[in-house]
Image: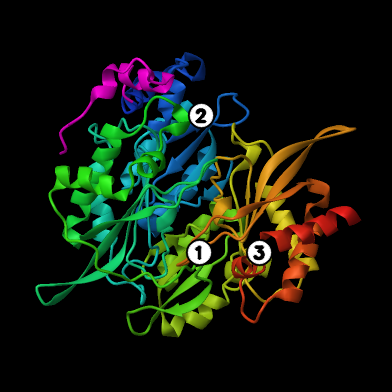
């Protein structure tokens, strides 16, 4: 384990309040308190200072603050078994008012839990090798990865053992349970950037280098990505790591963040600010002081970005087997539907499922002679479609103010109804990704969307009403960029018609096979703003 090298911040009088709380009691310590005290004595017994520490247990207070909680379950790399899925479904049915959400980081979230439920939920999760520990909090969170790992024709290696190794090292590791703030990691060997490398604090992407005359497949290392109110794209270090060096590199990068990350202002405590201030050269210098030298960069193997979408039936690298990419509208399902997915995984596949950062799911290892029968399954025909409608299929939403204390507006139902409206109103043969978020924290990742919608409020003669700011042109393709804000705050009653007309301009002016973000890049933001201005005059 890494030994603390530079803990000068411990005695820093300028620390923010959360840092003092963490020094007084480590976040991991709340788990025992929950199990031994709060779960027995109830919500009213919870010390106010422990509510923030509940995050280390994978738990947040949900809105309204009346004794109910959200819990996030780690799905490392986005691969789980049918047995795990059934346990998750039973938890949702018994404790979570039948609600299951797939997140943009491949995790699963429950709502409506009480503190009395937590011990039994932990036991159930543990029985199938799952956990919510450190799914939240100032610690290494769920590791994003390739949900096709092991079967992917477009991967350079199976990353599941690597993800498992890194996951095992960091979870409950008190050397790293007090980071400056939340810390997000991705590990993928898929050449289409399935794990969104550029928006993670630490990311590993497929690479190749000739070393002593031998072509070696490994990884490049990216640091300093993140969204929220001040988004940054991760930058690549001049480092090539072999598969057996990934954990060493992850320990080193995380140690640098722990020891040098900012702890004075809470909103400045992410790794992206440290990397932006230092630059990648200095960051690498500090890293190799901890790890020793790595090989310098090799050949980057990322070819583009599929945004985490795998719809349809596709060949695996195992001859005669296929995987199915299914649409889960806005990432929400009920317990019965999740249990049905587990049945499909057993009956048609090898008993494994994938969760995607597009909030969708996969069924893996379907033999060729079962593909047609799989297509006819009622849940595939009617609910989780192989080829969803354009807008419903590419709609992403955060939790919104239905449950989230930070969100300004409701998003889940609003995004679903908006996507259905656009599918009924606009005929479009090209994927157009619309992401909706309820606040600047951007759990719905609006910055990387073709069209991003961020909740806001507008004062009218009838009082404050919900509205959305509009952003256009985001992508994590080779030339990655965040979308840019238009001068337009659209009230919810006008949002559907506004977007239908805005997308209509794109249909008229696009080049053949041109995606929306490419169109925005070609015509320029001023041109899009002129379109918006014309629509606002008409309204």
Residue reaching furthest left? 212
**Looking at this view, is 282 or 130 the one in front?**
282
Task: Work out how far the residue at label 2 is from the one at label 1, CA to CA, in angstroms.
Answer: 35 Å
Secondary structure at numbered mark 1: loop
- The mark lying in front, picked from 2 and 3, is 3
Q: Earlier in the sequence, mark 2 or mark 1?
A: 2
Task: Work out how far the residue at label 2 is from the one at label 3, CA to CA, in angstroms.
Answer: 50 Å
- The mark lying in front, picked from 2 and 1, is 1
Q: Quadrant of residue 55?
A: top left
Across and down, in percent, residue 431 comes to 62, 70
**Looking at this view, is 255 or 391 the one in front?**
255
The disc placed on residue 114 is: 2
Instruction: Name the residue carrying label 1.
Output: 307
Vertical placement of 144 versus 402: above or below?
Answer: below
Q: Name the colour scheme.
A: rainbow
Within 10 Å of disc 1 (Cα), the crowding (few <14, some 14-19, many 20+) is: many
């Amino acid at each position: 384990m890494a030994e603390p090298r530079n803990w000068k911040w411990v005695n820093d009088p300028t620390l923010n309040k959360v840092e003092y709380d963490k020094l007084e009691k480590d976040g991991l310590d709340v788990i025992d308190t929950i199990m031994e005290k709060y779960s027995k004595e109830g919500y009213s017994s919870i010390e106010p200072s422990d509510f923030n520490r509940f995050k280390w247990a994978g738990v947040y207070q949900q809105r309204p603050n009346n004794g109910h909680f959200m819990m996030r379950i780690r799905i490392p790399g986005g691969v789980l078994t049918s047995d795990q899925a059934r346990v998750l479904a039973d938890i949702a049915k018994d404790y979570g008012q039948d609600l299951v959400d797939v997140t943009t980081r491949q995790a699963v979230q429950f709502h409506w839990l009480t503190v009395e439920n937590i011990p039994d939920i932990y036991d159930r999760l543990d029985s199938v090798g799952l956990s919510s520990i450190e799914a939240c909090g100032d610690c290494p969170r769920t590791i994003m990865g390739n949900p096709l790992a092991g079967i992917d024709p477009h991967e350079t290696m199976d990353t599941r053992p690597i993800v498992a190794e890194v996951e095992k090292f960091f979870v409950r590791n008190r050397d790293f349970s007090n980071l400056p703030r939340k810390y997000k990691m991705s590990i993928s060997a898929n050449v289409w950037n399935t794990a969104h490398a550029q928006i993670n604090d630490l990311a590993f992407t497929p690479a190749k280098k000739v070393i002593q005359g031998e072509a070696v497949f490994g990884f490049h290392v990216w640091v300093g990505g993140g969204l929220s109110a001040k988004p940054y794209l991760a930058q690549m270090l001049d480092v090539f790591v072999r598969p057996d060096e990934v954990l060493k590199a992850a320990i080193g990068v995380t140690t640098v963040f722990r020891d040098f990350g900012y702890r004075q202002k809470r909103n400045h405590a992410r790794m992206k600010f440290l990397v932006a201030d230092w630059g990648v050269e200095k960051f690498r210098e500090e890293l190799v002081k901890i790890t020793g030298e790595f090989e310098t960069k090799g050949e980057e193997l990322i070819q583009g970005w599929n945004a985490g979408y795998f719809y349809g039936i596709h060949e695996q690298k195992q001859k005669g087997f296929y995987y199915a990419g299914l649409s889960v509208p806005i990432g929400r399902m009920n317990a019965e539907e999740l249990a049905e997915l587990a049945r499909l995984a057993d009956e048609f596949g090898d008993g494994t499922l994938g969760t995607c950062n597009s909030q969708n799911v996969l069924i893996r290892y379907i033999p060729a002679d079962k593909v047609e029968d799989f297509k006819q399954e009622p849940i595939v025909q009617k609910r989780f479609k192989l080829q969803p409608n354009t807008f419903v299929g590419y709609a992403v939403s955060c939790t919104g103010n239905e449950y989230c204390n930070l969100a300004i507006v409701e998003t889940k139902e609003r995004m679903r109804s908006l996507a259905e409206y656009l599918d009924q109103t606009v005929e479009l043969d090209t994927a157009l990704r619309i992401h909706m978020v309820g606040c600047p924290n951007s759990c719905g990742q609006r910055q990387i969307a073709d069209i991003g919608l961020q909740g806001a409020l507008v004062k009218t003669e009838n009082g404050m009403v919900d509205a959305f700011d509009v952003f256009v042109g985001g992508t994590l393709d080779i030339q990655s960029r965040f979308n840019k804000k238009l001068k337009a705050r659209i009230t919810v009653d006008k949002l559907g018609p506004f977007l239908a007309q805005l997308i209509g301009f794109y249909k008229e002016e696009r080049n053949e096979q041109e995606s929306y973000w490419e169109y925005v890049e070609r015509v320029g933001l001023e041109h899009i703003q002129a379109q918006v201005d014309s629509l606002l005059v008409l309204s």
